[in-house]
Amino acid sequence: MKNGFSQHVEAVREQYDRVAPRYASHFTDAMGKAEDREVARRLSWLRNEHVAGKILDLGCGDGHLVTLASPPPRRYVGIDISPKMIALARQKHPGYDFRIGDMHNLGDFRDNSFDSVISTFGSLSYSLAPTIVINEIQRVLAPTGRFWLQVLSWRYFFRTSHIVNNHLDFVGYTEERLRNLFRNFRHVRVTGINVVGHVMPWLIGLEARTVGRRWPNLAVYLVVEGFGNA
Ligand SMILES: C[S@@+](CC[C@H](N)C(=O)[O-])C[C@H]1O[C@@H](n2cnc3c(N)ncnc32)[C@H](O)[C@@H]1O
């Protein structure tokens, strides 16, 4: 018999399989574009291959991170629970290593085997057992490696542009909860993206550098970033 945890993972897989064909086109409005620009700006360190090294993308979806990074990363593995999202990613980015997989079990990967662990646009929020994922991140991330994870904040509950069913559970984070969960990592920073973007998308870049830094809990997305536990 399946427990609540695996039932939820299956519900997420089913929902993302269902929305896969319209996933990319759902976020092409002014707000989606402004959020993409801000995330790409925040990930500009990926341009330096010596800094980025080997990248693991958790909940990679249709390979959005590869689309956002310029130039696209060279050493990259993306995993996603949804076979349909992975099929899209492979179609969009031939030659890239995309795998069907669950972020709660990174058993395919050796200890300390990645220099960067990244997750964009809230994938980690769909885990109802984030400490399992965080322990896995800690295991596969090199001690000097870097993580950069964009999660949904408590404010996301009030957002109206959800693509998946509103009844699908997700974790809406606060800065305090993230700091507590990532307490074993070094130089942890929590910042916010998109405070008033639903009405003023053009402000997303400016507010991320100001309000989002100072009061991350006001934003729709939180970014928790830092380094391994060398
Ligand atoms: C909001 S989408 C983000 C996709 C992509 N990162 C982006 O920036 O567009 C969330 C993704 O997380 C994936 N996901 C959710 N739970 C997962 C899990 N336990 N393991 C792997 N992927 C998961 C979903 O299938 C979905 O593709």
Image: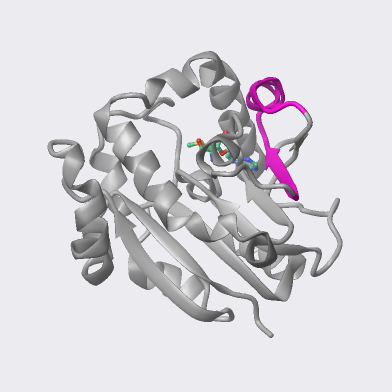
Location of residue 53 (image quadrant): bottom right
The image position of residue 156, as x and y in percent, is 30, 44
- 83 magenta-colored: yes
Q: Nearer the viewer, residue 149 or 206?
A: 206
The image position of residue 44, as x and y in percent, is 49, 56
Q: Which residue is outermost to the bottom?
A: 230
Q: Is the residue 32 above or below the residue 143 in the image?
A: above
Q: Is the residue 3 above or below the residue 113 in the image?
A: above
Quadrant occupied by the N terminus = top right
Location of residue 168 (image quadrant): top left
Location of residue 223 (image quadrant): bottom left
Quadrant occupied by the C terminus = bottom right
- 66 magenta-colored: no
Side of 110 relative to 139 (left or right): right
In the image, what residue occupies the spot 64% across and 67% down? 51
Side of 96 relative to 186 (left or right): right
In the image, what residue occupies the spot 39% across and 40% down? 36
In the image, what residue occupies the spot 43% across and 26% down? 164
- Res. 129 in view: no
The image position of residue 221, as x and y in percent, is 35, 51
Q: Is the residue 57 above or below the residue 115 in the image?
A: above
In the image, what residue occupies the spot 29% across and 25% down? 29
Q: Which residue is outermost to the top?
A: 21
Q: Is the residue 125 above or below the residue 14 in the image?
A: below
Q: Quadrant of ligand 1?
A: top right
Which region of the structure is painted magenta? 75-94
